[in-house]
Image (spheres, rainbow, N blue to C red):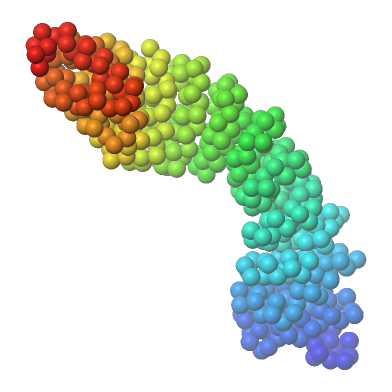
Amino acid sequence: MLRSSDPMIQLQAAVAIRNLSFSPENEVRIAAENGIPPLVSALRSQDPKIHEHVLVSLRNISANQDNKVRIVQEGALGPLVFLLRSEDHLLCQLAAGVLRNLASNLVNQVKIVQEDALPPLFALMRSPKTAVIEQAIGCVRNLSVNAENEVKIVAGNGLPVLVSCLKMEERAIQEHAAVILRNLSVNAENKVKIVQEGALKPLVLLLQSKNEFTQEQAAVALRNLSINATNEHKMVQEGTIPAMIDLLRSRNFRLNEHAAVSLRNLSVNPDNESKIVAEGGLPPLLAMLRSSDPMIQLQAAVAIRNLSFSPENEVRIAAENGIPPLVSALRSQDPKIHEHVLVSLRNISANQDNKVRIVQEGALGPLVFLLRSEDHLLCQLAAGVLRNLASNLVNQVKIVQEDALPPLFALMRSPKTAVIEQAIGCVRNLSVNAENEVKIVAGNGLPVLVSCLKMEERAIQEHAAVILRNLSVNAENKVK
């Protein structure tokens, strides 16, 4: 009857099928009875009422995965895109709703954009009807999952209307816009364009949303944007740092992680290091080092590593009781966490007071353990921390008591020059102590020191010469 030449019969059949299509069982049955071709054909009717009922039927049955493919195969995209330009708000809403369902299929995402659906969808996102906007932006959200479409949405001037949607009061529309921008921000070229289009301020405001999902989408979008160095200054201007620090205090682990990554990225810029600390970012980041979630621990460790390069923060990290969680994190099972924590400890151990605190907090055991790592970088960094700590007279004794000499001597035979330099630099500092002079020789340190004397690297030769000078003060060592 949908193919009847009598418009009234067509209409009544369309209404009946519409009603039947609300049943999940009938989604499959309508397709099984070869109902998709006449429904698609009826989209080309001249009667808007028939359009309405057929669109509802297609919207309902397109929730089925197999039907998404069949509907497109039957040529529905052309008439659906045509109906997006209708002067009837309801028809626009329904056509966008069908396309939204179809766009959850990966193949259809490409075909819908190829059918030139983006311009009318963008136009509908400026509709005076909220229901129309929601279906149109929901469709664009699904389309934005495709990498090619990420580029085409921006090239088709979709950013201005997306930013407008971010500013709307309707939560669902805000959420869709935030998800789309999150997807678009994965593309390197889009990162700058999104910021230029004014998306930062509304995204930062959405971090305060009472809906955690919306918060998360905005946080991920900002996280992606923070990777681009060009965006850093503007992000700071728009209040991203305090907003992200607030998220660090959330009970939602995912929000913690996204905020930590954003702050990690922003903290690469030395100008931002002091701002993050001034806004109260250190305490929550340090607390996250004790998180039960390894990913959150890792992101916090990277952020603190970046902050630790500032001389002011050497003192501030200790003042915020940051040394205990840093030392505790040395016992993590994750080598990446070890790496970033070791850099932080190396940096803050340049401070005289911190040298004492780090040892008091029990760092020597895990540091000496890490000297035996199979990872050259971890060995280098652990030796570097111990080298700094060994410039303290009390620590010189404790480090040797912790049995650090054997692994240090082993590292002085490393194939990596940078590892040798840190290990021998540590031994140089330890050799200042009279008791250590004896223990270095007793521990069979002389052969490796002589080998280092013969190396071409000036710094290593120098360290070896200084150590031998120190050892030669001892009467028994002179002959040896």
Viewer-side residue, 265 vs 1? 265
User: The N terminus appears in which quarter of the rendering?
Assistant: bottom right
In percent of the image, x 38 and y 19: which residue is there? 349
**Residue 333 image position (x, y, % from top left):** 33, 41
Would you place residue 171 above or below residue 97 in this image?
above
| Residue 15 x, y percent position in the rendering | 79, 80
Quadrant location of the C terminus in the rendered image:
top left
The x, y position of residue 94, in whole percent, is: 78, 68
Counting the numbered discs, the total is 0
Question: Does 60 sit above or below residue 220?
Answer: below
**Viewed as shown, does residue 303 lie left or right of 132?**
left
Q: Which residue occupies 82% across, 62% down? A: 120
In terms of image quadrants, where is residue 432? top left
Specify whether 225 is left or right of 430.
right
Q: Residue at x 84, y 86 (%)?
A: 10
Looking at the rendering, which quadrant does residue 289 occupy?
top left
Q: Is residue 403 visible?
A: no
Above or below: residue 411 compared with residue 68: above
Viewer can see residue 339 = yes
Residue 42: % across, % down: 81, 82
Q: Quadrant of residue 103?
A: bottom right
Please state which of residues 247 and 364 is positioned toward the viewer in this rendering. 364
Q: Nearer the viewer, residue 201 or 129?
A: 201
Of residues 38 and 26, the one drawn nearer to the viewer in this rendering:
38
The residue lying at 62 percent from left, 74 percent from top is 64
